[in-house]
Amino acid sequence: MTAHLTLYNADGTVFTERQCISFSLLKERYLPYDTLTAAVLCETVGMPNPVRAVFALDGVTLHDGIVRSCKTEQSKNRRLMQVTSRGFGESLLHNQLVPGLYFHVTLESLMTTYALPHLTYESGLSETNYIYVKESTAMWDAVSAFNYKYNLGYPYVTRCNHLRMTPKTGDTPIVLPQNNVTARSVGGDASAIVSRIDMADIDGTYGQFTMSNPRAAERGIVRVKQIPCDRQFLYNPEDALAYRIAYSNRRLTQKSVSYLGYCGEDLEDAVTLNGFVTGRVSRILLRGNQHGIQTTDTFYFDDFCNT
């Protein structure tokens, strides 16, 4: 596979580096951005200071994001550039909506609040009655609340910087190459799990709404949270509890497969390895160097993934 890194300077100049020494690309189901780190032999004249990075394998763009750091070192007859970049979906974490109650909300009405570059979103979704935005609420939190009200789901960002609310359906599973598999693992992460949530009513009286988490009980975990009335779910108080418990269960059960090469899978694509796993991929780690490329696909089995 051939890796290309195209970089954009603030002055509008564009240059492409074709000698990639190493790279790592991480895509995660519960984050609105992917993260790229790359080291390339810099052929560009001068010492560039890029603001945007586009990474492609065999002509297919896998990452388009904002450069977080860049360093170019001159050593004898070569210059090595090291770049770290995050996808443009990160802007959903750094922009805040005006606090208040929003009625007849659509994904479009949320996403057009600000002109967010290079970030697209799913179209044709119906509206939800309202969302409530607290002070200092990131757009990602508002989008997540919209998604849960829309279909009890959690949003995710696919290639490249495309925000989705609905599950992918109908695609034929990508078959991983059995002979190239280097490792398999089974596990889980219970570090965020909550055992019970008690919520106050609109008058501030605690204990009026409560919900327990059977997945915590079966593990013998006791973590009780007391929260004020969540106006986001004022007309469906049980949803405020169910949403928090579901989110605390994220990544609870996992399977991972590492193999040599890359089959082109993206987040939530259907993937199968005969006799071990069939599901929609929740985390992808691509790593490459002069020896080739290794892919690690992780499948979460929780309240939002592979339900």
Image (spheres, helix red, strand yellow):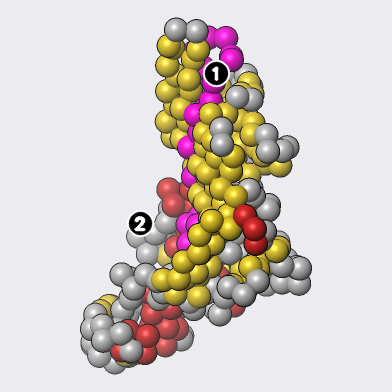
Q: Residue at x 58, y 43 (%)?
A: 293
Q: Residue at x 49, y 15 (%)?
A: 79
In this view, 290 is above or below 174:
above
Q: Amino acid at mark 2?
A: Ser
Question: How packed is label 2: few (under 14 Cα within 10 Å), some, or many (20 or more)?
Answer: few
Relative to 242, say whether 146 is above or below: above
The CA span between labels 1 and 2 is: 41 Å
Q: Is residue 3 visible?
A: yes
Tally of numbered discs: 2
* Residue 20 occupies quadrant: top right
Query: Quick check: is 302 in the magenta stretch?
Result: no
Q: Which residues are magenta?
A: 27-51
Q: Residue 196: x, y in percent? A: 29, 85
1 vs 2, front mark: 1
Tag 1 residue:
42
Q: Pointer 1 and pointer 2: residues touching (CB < 8 Å)?
A: no
**Location of residue 84 with respect to 125 vertically, above or below:** above
Residue 197 vs residue 258: left or right?
Answer: left
Q: Residue 164 location in percent, x, y?
A: 62, 62
Task: Name the residue tied to disc 2.
Answer: 136
Q: Amino acid at mark 1?
A: Cys
Question: Which corner quadrant holds the N terminus?
Answer: top right
Q: Is residue 46 magenta?
A: yes
